[in-house]
Amino acid sequence: EKKLTAALEGLGLESPEIEIHEQGRTIMATVVSGSFSGMDEAERQRMVWEALRATLSDDERLAVEFVFTIAPSDEEPLGEAV
């Protein structure tokens, strides 16, 4: 978990908010950053997984089920969903 957090912090994103969720043997993460604004999901995922491949071992990486990448503009304020 610490190595995953360090890898995500090492992306050089603007004010990243990182949450790690462990569920048994699998890990999911959420990263919110303004740096993701204007990027499509494929670009965001490519950036994240390239960093994880560079810093985590194969076994550590296999434990990571998914990394959600969110720009603040992606999040809808509560009560305003249609």
Image: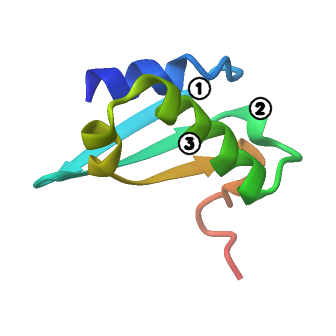
Callout 2 secondary element: helix
Where residue 17 appears, x then y in whole percent? 52, 30
Locate residue 31, reporting x and y percent.
54, 39
How many residues crowd mark 2 within 10 Å: few (<14), some (14–19), many (20+)?
Answer: some
Residue that extends furthest to the bottom in the rendered view of this protein: 82
Q: Disc count in the image? A: 3
Kind of residue sitting beneath label 1: Pro
Residue that protrudes farthest toward the left in the picture: 24
Say if 24 sits above or below 19 in the image: below
Q: Residues within 10 Å of mark 1 (few under 14, many from 20)?
A: some
Task: Determine whether the residue tagged by mark 3 lies in a helix, strand or loop.
Answer: helix
Point out which mark residue 16 bears: 1
The answer to the question of whether label 1 and label 3 lie on touching residues, with beta carbons closer than 8 A, is no
What quarter of the picture does the C terminus occupy?
bottom right
Residue 44: x and y in percent read 70, 46
Label of residue 35 in the image: 2
Which of labels 1 and 3 is toward the front?
3
- Disc 1 to disc 3, how far (Cα)? 16 Å
User: How far is mark 3 from mark 2, CA to CA?
Assistant: 16 Å
- Label 1, label 2: how many angstroms apart (C-alpha)? 8 Å
Give the amino acid at mark 3: Trp
Please say if the residues under marks 1 and 2 sit with CB atoms less than 8 Å apart. Answer: yes
What residue is rendered at 69% in x and 70% in y?
80
Of callouts 1 and 2, the N-terminal one: 1
